Amino acid sequence: MEDKFKMLVLQIKDGNKDAFTEFYRLTVRYVYSIVYAYLLSNEDTEDVIQNTYLKLYAIRKRVDPEKSILAYMKRIAINYAFKQMRQKKKVIIKEASFANEEGTKELIQEALKKLEEKDRIVLALHYLDNTSVKEIGMLVHEKEGSVKSRLFRARKKLKEVINNEKI
């Protein structure tokens, strides 16, 4: 698939709109799943996706076909998602899917809402998007040690909130 992406990137750099359409078709679900985990709104996610692909097309001549285009897309999409969150002060709770456990999803969503925004962000990045501590640090402009501490405290707070909700 990477070879196909390299070929498409080269064609996109030359202004081939059909290649861009094909690239969009192959990657939009991936980008959607990442952005939706942050915004929890179809409408907001679609706005971010549109901005992501518009940005990519606008800077297409600077894209290096030898580097991972998916990693590049992920970075653009997350930056736009953060921008959207700052603009609308969105809560970033991903719809959890727990099989046959009535009320669990709602309990976790409510518990996450009670956490500070920075705690929700690091939890979402780490557990929902499998982002490394180093990458989270770069995204939220914190040192790795600070991210690790925040993850530890956020898990602890989440557990406390959930335990208090069950009572």
Image (spheres, grey):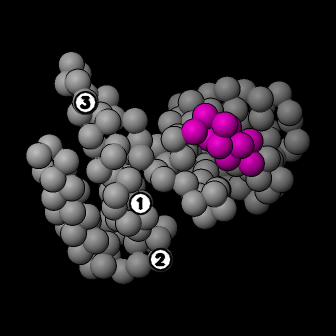
Asked if the residue under mark 2 is in contact with the one under mark 3, i.e. CB atoms within 8 Å, the reply is no
**Position in image of residue 153 (x %, y %):** 21, 69
Tell which residue pokes out farthest to the top in this image. 100
Where 76 falls versus 30 (above or below)? below
Mark 1 highlights which residue? 121
Disc 3/disc 1 C-alpha distance (Å): 23 Å
Residue that appears at 56% across and 30% down: 29
Query: Which amino acid type corresponds to the residue marked 3 in the rendered image?
Result: Gly
Mark 2 highlights which residue? 141
Q: Which of 111 and 60 is in front in this view?
A: 111
Say few, some or many: other residues with alpha carbon within 10 Å of mark 2 (under 14 / 14 to 19 / 20 or more).
few
**Segment tinted magenta in the rendering:** 41-51
**Position in image of residue 82 (x %, y %):** 57, 60
**Numbered circle sitting on residue 8:** none
Query: Which amino acid type corresponds to the residue marked 2 in the rendered image?
Result: His
Mark closest to the chain's N terminus, 2 or 1: 1
